[in-house]
Amino acid sequence: MKYHLWTEGCQMNVADSQRVGSALEHLGYTQTEQPAEADVIVMNTCVVRQSAEDKAYGRLSSFKPLKQKNPNLVINLMGCLVGVRGFDKLKARFPYVDVFSPPSDPGPLISHLTQGEIRSTEDAETTRRFLMMDEELLLPAAERGSLVSAHVPVVYGCSHACTFCIIPYKRGIERSRPVGDIVAEARSLAAQGVKEVTLLGQIVDRYGTDIPAGPNLAGLLRLVSEVEGVERVRFLTSHPNYFGDELIEAIASLPKVMPHIELPIQAGNDTVLENMKRGYTQQDYRELVAKIRTALPNCSIATDIIVGFPGESESQFLQTWQVLTDLKLDVAHLARYSSREGTVATRRMSDDVTDEEKLRRFRMLEQLQEAIAAEINGKYVGETVPVLFEEKIKGRWRGRTPTNKLVFVETDENLRGRILQVQITWTGPWSMQARLLHEIKSPV
């Protein structure tokens, strides 16, 4: 029996797909890259932007002929396209889909395949135990022993409800995972060769706020750092409102926690931020960045920015441009505003910035950030840095520095899973090249 996984979207979806693969392999399935060979096809979808939703619909339609040819084929639609609420319209539109699964919930599929022996939300505890197999997450065979960096969800859903965001409506309210499950998963991943874990949450620095007497994110970082075999720990994505002093101190004091912070600003104008319901001003954000850099002088900071939010004027956009110019952040993930059905922005605001103007603003920030990143990375030339190597691509080994800089090294040696000192020889805005400082021998 074989399964095929199609995954689109964020790191949380990647982690969810690994959990689905783990559950299926516990049932005896093996993974295939060819949908035509599969007995089960799982589509894990994203709808953050219209383009992602359109892509999901197109892919789903392409599987219809396979179902017609093989009526026993099980097709599972999963993720944000399904959401946590009713999906009767999807059932009517795609009658050839057998199972509809909310985000982060393999239960409905497992229940279908086992004919209810393993139930889903009706018996969440049974499902949880099955999927963890007595607190063991089994990576899909294709990744077992070769995956170097893995994502571990720690907070599902979101309750902040920014006006532009569809996530609370699709993934539900904020739920922190039990700390024991998280640590057990980290141990299991380490036992399967994983060297780096990234703790995930839509607002990861709110971890534990819904668990009485439990650890917060700073405490969780300390516990995961103690897991033998885990050599690096990262976390994302943070929210400026909840990024406090205790978390900064934890990053500074824990050697395994990497000094790279994902801290979205979304816009640099206070009126736009208020309309987005972000809960801070651009000055608040500037002061937080200054505080972080004082405590962590060698850290890198990434941000998210949306251009063309409803009502955003040219002068308001230029304030975003100025914030990015002044702060010189390492990475800026840019997006053009996309209206999402059900969000407050779509219900109450007019999408009045043209597509052409959104693209112009996007390109302006893109060019600015490229220059900033090139300047920051250029300072690494000649420097010696530790790199965790993940995989070989087109004859070059790819890895990352503690500050999440992408580094390539040419060598015939096997570097997978190793943290090695390299000297940076060339930099660009998006990656670097380096040489190994010492010759190594591949393990026998």
Image (cartoon, helix red, strand yellow):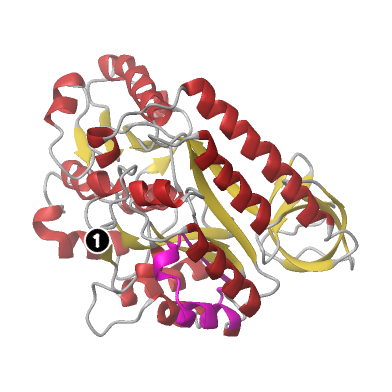
Query: Is residue 243 part of the magenta span, yes or no?
Result: yes
Q: Give the quarter of the image for residue 9.
A: top left
Residue 326 drawn in magenta:
no
Q: Residue at x 22, y 56 (%)?
A: 173
| Quarter in which the N terminus is drawn | top left
Labels in figure, total: 1
Q: Is residue 25 visible?
A: no
Pick the residue in front: 124 or 73: 124
Q: Is residue 8 above or below residue 242?
A: above
Task: Look at mark 1 in the image and give the residue it sits on.
Answer: 130
- For the record, the magenta segment spans 229-252
Dot 1 alpha-carbon crowd within 10 angstroms: few under 14, some 14 to 19, many 20 or more: some
Q: Secondary structure at mark 1?
A: helix
Q: Position of residue 203 (x, y in %)?
A: 38, 61
Quarter of the image that includes the C terminus: bottom right
Q: Position of residue 174 (x, y in %)?
A: 26, 60
Image quadrant where residue 129 sits = bottom left
Tell me which amino acid carries mark 1.
Phe
- Quadrant for residue 214, please give it: bottom left
Q: Residue at left 36%, top 53%?
A: 19
Observer-nearest of 214 and 263:
263
Residue at point 41% right, 30% down? Answer: 52
